[in-house]
Image (cartoon, rainbow, N blue to C red):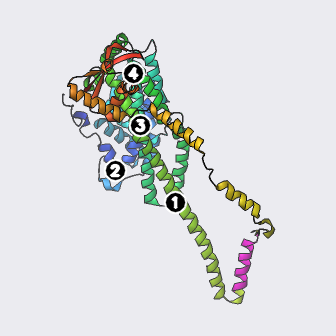
Amino acid sequence: MSAAAPFFEGERLRFFRPLSGSRRELVAACLRALFERLHGPAADYSHNLTRELLRELLLPVVREYQDRVSLDAGEDELSAPELNDPHQLVTALIRALLNDGWLEQFADRNGLVTAFRFSRSGKLFAEALWSLDRPSRSRQRNMRGCRNALEAALSDRGDAHDLVDAYEYAEKVIEDLTDGIDYFQELVRHLMQTASVHTQWNEFVEFLDRFQRDYSKQLTADNATLNRQAIRQKLEKLRLLPEHKVARIDEQLHDVAHWAVKDHTGTTVYDWLLDRIEDIVDAACESKQPGFLKAMETYLKRVNGLAMQSMMLRAGQTRHAYLAAIQKLAVSAPEAQERLLEAIAERIAPAEVRVLDPASFKLRTATQRRKSVTVSILPRATREDLMDSAMSRAESEAFSLPNDVVAQQLRSDLRVFKHPIRLSALPVATARDLLRTMQAVEAVRSVAGEDMTVRRLPTPLANEYYSGTDYEIDLKK
């Protein structure tokens, strides 16, 4: 593997210097405004960004953020006294972004002028700053996107691009859930630092808006658990495709997914990509989604506790106010007592006190009490009911064979025979043998068969009970 080219060389030698100087908030705001103009949803691609247009774009931002100076950064080229003039500060800012590799100049042949654009690295980092400040508009449908891409790969016109789309959608599922976990953990940290319900109310309202916009769909239609079985079924169908179609898609993958060719392990890129999609979806269901729900629950519990604490403190302050009024009356002169009582009377005059009617309280009669006790007694099961329940349980467990048992038997056979085993070579003399044969591939692909490998063979499997695709099972080397 070749070593990556150094990042901090040439024009990128001091790339992050503008973001660590005294006016870093100003620089970040200008980069967000530049990205919005050049690459945002409302970007104007018909006109290049000339120097005059660049100055007009940055001048309002500079005036808004001009007074935000970080005193802990020391002196730099943007903190000189003569840069209090917004026009001069814009000129110095453009010069700094050019010198440190954020912007680059190019010739606009249509207007015969010099225009400005982001450098490649400048665009990537400016997009990160822009995305952090911009509300998410994602519809959180990556799980459904993965399922639909696999369905497209199964169609007659399916190709390698559909399979790569499914893989990228599956990766986005993990990214969405991880982003949600980080978001709630950050809210909890901020909540514990400030510990004030007044300062946290805006963040809670923002959470409710984000929940309605993103997380509600992520927990319902795009839920990882709800779509997991459908994705598994489609992956199994893709593994059973005809050999000629699998070979065609695998050949296409070598052209369109060079990263997969480099990273894959096993026989083909096709099988490796299917296994990776299944592993990612399983990880989303088993670890990331429970972690996401736990982080959301933790944040809601902290907000609820803080709100309850604030209410209790406010109620205590109200009670203490009455005690303070009584103490003040006790030490005041008669004239001051009259004035204080009149002021209190004016404020509590609109209050209305209601007392419950004692006639509305009725005790239960003896008949009602006996009836409630009778209903609460569990019915006693008869012998016929117990027999029916036992038979139903035995019938349901008769065709249930744990993957651990199947994997252990396969493992023992492989160690005895010392060579791979084919499904077509397994005995089917009894119903248990038949179930073990039909469940062998699933057992190897489960957690119980992590030390074994399974490979699909081009030859079919056919016996007197069922027909399908033959597989070869072996221990991992």
Considering the numbered disc 1 on the image, is that residue within a helix, a strand or a loop? helix
Separation (CA) of disc 4 from disc 1: 47 Å
Q: Which residue is mark 4?
A: 163
Q: Report the magenta stretch's main SS.
A: helix
Residue lying at the far right of the rendered structure: 359
Considering the numbered disc 4 on the image, is that residue within a helix, a strand or a loop? helix
Q: Name the residue nearer the viewer: 56 or 233.
A: 233
Q: Which mark is residue 22?
A: 2
Separation (CA) of disc 4 from disc 2: 48 Å
Q: Residue at x 36, y 53 (%)?
A: 70
Screen quadrant of the C terminus? top left
Q: Which residue is mark 3?
A: 284
Looking at the rendering, the stretch of residues picked out in magenta corresponds to 336-350
Instruction: Find out whether the residues at labels 1 and 2 contact each other: C-beta distance under 8 Å.
Output: no
Residue 325: percent from the left, percent from the top? 64, 80
Separation (CA) of disc 3 from disc 4: 19 Å
Eye-nearest disc, 3 or 2? 3
Q: Earlier in the sequence, mark 4 or mark 2?
A: 2
Q: Amino acid at mark 4?
A: Leu
Q: Earlier in the sequence, mark 3 or mark 4?
A: 4
Residue 44: percent from the left, percent from the top? 47, 27
Q: Which residue is mark 1?
A: 305
Instruction: Find out whether the residues at labels 3 and 2 contact each other: C-beta distance under 8 Å.
Output: no
Q: Amino acid at mark 2?
A: Ser
In the image, 355: left or right of 144?
Answer: right
Considering the numbered disc 3 on the image, is that residue within a helix, a strand or a loop? helix
Q: Amino acid at mark 3?
A: Ala
Q: Is residue 10 visible?
A: yes
Q: Residues within 10 Å of mark 1 (few under 14, many from 20)?
A: few
In the image, 446: left or right of 227?
Answer: left
